[in-house]
Amino acid sequence: MNRLRTRVVLASTLLVAGSALLPAAATSGATRGGSHQHGHHHPHPTPSTESGRVVLDWERIAFATIYPATPIPVGVPLLGYTSTAMYDAVRASSSRHDSSETAAVAQAAHDVLVHYVPAAAASLDTSLTTSLAGVPDGSAEDRGVWTGKKVAARLIEERADDGYLDTTIHYTLPPGIGTWQPVPPATDMLGAWIGSMDPLVVKRLAKVNGPDALTSDDYTTDYNEVKLLGSATSTVRSTAQTDTSRFFNSNSATMVGDALVRYLEAHPETLQDTAWLFAAIHSAMTDSLITCWQLKRDVGFWRPIEAVAGAADDGNPDTQPQAGWTPLLAPTPPYSDYVTGHGCLTSPAVEVIRTRLGETTPLELRSSNFPTAPRTYPSLSELEHDALNSRIWGGLHFRDAMSDGYAIGHRTARAVMHRLD
């Protein structure tokens, strides 16, 4: 992290506020087909008169198909595949004469999900039948279905060797001061392979400068903050901070997307714009996560629970150990502190929405831990403020990991939006 650690929350706010100055259509990159890595070009599509509802329907279906059966980070690329396939299906269908975009979107999403989650095939078949029942029978439906199948098949082919689920890749850092280790009986981190996946859209992953040195003033500040506020028995953390920490300790891969689905049901966008939004969000989340997991695996910085236990040996006289310290949120996720996975999923989604729909877009967030108490924030920056701090107040992350994770998410989202059109 940089030296302006005392202003880290302000810096985060400035980061997101500055990005809001981007024009809504900052998408000058070439049209990307399939995986968006391989320059397939469609003719410029004509605007569709069909409803964006099919995209919202299949985003919901994707959420329910992938979760909770799949671990949160492992499911994120599947959201990326599905959403980019829907966007490519819209573009491909719109460029053809007499082709139903609704049929193309539904078929593409269905085929991608069936390929990656075959156990859900019967349910997905039923959902596809429902979607196609709303499309008039005839050549337009047939062409749309054919287009959706082609788009999905191309994406599946192009992503076949992208590193997804490559279980030959492991966490290998030896034990040591400052280094995270799996908690027995586990011998590996969850999804070590994610850090070696081919990005979906960006060509270069975002760069950060790594965790603070254990003897630095910045680390000392972060250590004492999380030790004090993030403890399960903290007497300093407020009730509001505790509730916020638990509220955001929900599925960060779907929380913002689910809120956006419901917002767009009440405030519809065009079919193309709806598909673009989710393709940008889930591509940016995927590419941010790849960066995040590469750092978690290859840097392997210890989490607060290990840091507090090992503080007597960290070489820093200003970090005092505390026997039996545990975080508010338990269990601790099975991967290292730096950088935050939660932040690398929340921040790119929020950045896309901020850029396209505005800073004051009212998203109603729902948490599995507070099912009858949703939250709607006056601004997306305030949403991010609480989401970022929630992991510190919950004792899971140092502030440096959160701040750098949000920087990765914002930069990646801007790069993705620039490349999509």
Image (spheres, rainbow, N blue to C red):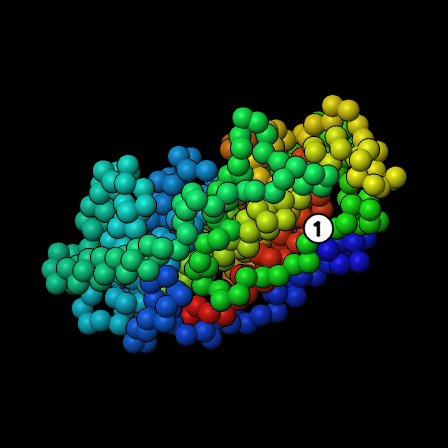
Residue under pointer 1: 211
Name the side, left or right, on which 319 lies relative to 283: right
Give the camera-side residue of 302 and 105: 302
Q: What residue is rendered at 37% in x and 68% in y?
A: 38
Which residue is the extreme one toward the front?
Answer: 174
- Identify whether 393 is placed above or below 349: above
User: Quick one: which residue is furthest to the top in this view?
Assistant: 324
Q: Where, quadrant-wise, is the C terminus in this rendering?
A: bottom left
Image position of 394 (left or right of 223): left
Most foreground residue, 326 or 348:
326
Expressed as whole percent of the image width and height from the top left, the position of residue 49 reads: 29, 65
Can residue 394 be seen here? The reply is: yes
Q: Please name the residue shown 58% across and 70% down the image.
A: 22
Visible residue check, residue 354: no
Query: Residue at (80%, 58%) from the top-left corner?
Result: 3
Label 1 Cα crowd, 10 Å radius (few <14 / some 14-19 / many 20+): many
Determine the secondary structure under disc 1.
loop
Q: Quadrant of residue 35?
A: bottom left
Q: Position of residue 146 (x, y in %)?
A: 18, 60
Of the residues shown, which amino acid type is indicated by label 1? Pro
Expressed as whole percent of the image width and height from the top left, the position of residue 128 reads 23, 47
Front-lying residue, 304 or 142: 304
Name the outermost residue toward the right. Answer: 317
Q: Position of residue 211 (x, y in %)?
A: 70, 50
Q: Give the quadrant of the N terminus.
A: bottom right
Could you tell whether 131 is left or right of 5 in the image?
left
Looking at the image, which residue is at 87% across and 40% down?
A: 318
Is the residue 147 above or below the residue 386 in the image? below
